[in-house]
Amino acid sequence: EQDLLLKQLVKIESESEEREKKEKKKEATDKSQRESRFDNAKEVCTTEVVAIEAQLINQFNHLESFISNLDVLGCFARKKQAEVVVTMRENLGLRIDAISQKLAIDVKFTQRLFTFSALISAYPALVISGYSFETLLTFKKPIEKLATEDENFRCLIERQITYDFEGEDDDTMLFR
């Protein structure tokens, strides 16, 4: 019995060590992929402009794609900030001025985050529209007016979205 128990313990120890090795390797791979994505983004933004038409078009298109992704990600980040301030108000009972003070942000910006939260709660698909936080807030009233007048538009922007990061390097954002 002791031999059997010893063999099982050795097996468990071996499996545990193997799992730890795999986790360390995955962490190293994840870090390497993040660094690679950053280096690729940096390269897109710092590559010299060459006076060859095909390369210029290609460079411009890469930059356009990069900027578009930044706009969508920026909107997601503002959405998350808006969720934070709403949670601070609802769960902690804080007023706007107290939230602003705790987060070291301007009261007007805090109010804009609350406004953005309400807009995105009503029309979730706006977050992937490609428009920035500022643009969406600037055109909030026309968006709301059009949503009341045009059922197709309203259905399109009321659509709930889920998003996943997929792909070889988790760089591809999928929206459903």
Image (tube, grey):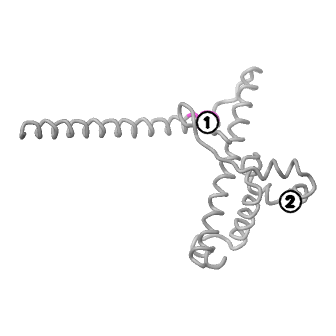
- Position in image of residue 58 (x %, y %): 72, 25
Of 12 and 23, nearer the camera is: 12
- Image position of 79 with respect to 94: above or below: above
Q: Secondary structure at mark 1?
A: strand
Q: Secondary structure at mark 2?
A: helix
Callout 2 environment at 10 Å: few (<14), some (14 to 19), or many (20+)?
A: some
Could you tell me how many numbered marks the image carries? 2
* Magenta segment boundaries in residue numbering: 40-44
Residue 160 belongs to the span the image colors magenta? no
Q: Quadrant of the C terminus?
A: top right
Q: In the drawing, what numbered circle is on residue 144?
A: 2
Which mark is nearer the camera, 1 or 2? 2
Q: Quadrant of the N terminus?
A: top left
Q: Residue furthest right?
A: 149
Q: Give yes or no for contact between labels 1 and 2 (Cβ–Cβ under 8 Å).
A: no
The residue depicted at 63 percent of the width and 63 percent of the height is 83
Q: In the drawing, what numbered circle is on residue 96?
A: none
Q: Residue furthest front?
A: 1
The residue depicted at 7 percent of the width and 36 percent of the height is 3
Q: Quadrant of residue 79?
A: bottom right
| Mark sitting earlier along the chain (1/2) | 2
- Image position of 85 with respect to 39: above or below: below
The residue depicted at 74 percent of the width and 56 percent of the height is 133
What amino acid is at disc 1?
Answer: Thr
What amino acid is at disc 2?
Answer: Glu
- Position in image of residue 5 (x %, y %): 11, 40
Q: Residue furthest left?
A: 2
Q: Main secondary structure of the magenta part?
A: helix
Of 56 and 141, nearer the camera is: 141
The residue depicted at 71 percent of the width and 35 percent of the height is 65
Q: In the drawing, what numbered circle is on residue 172?
A: 1
- Position in image of residue 30 (x %, y %): 45, 38
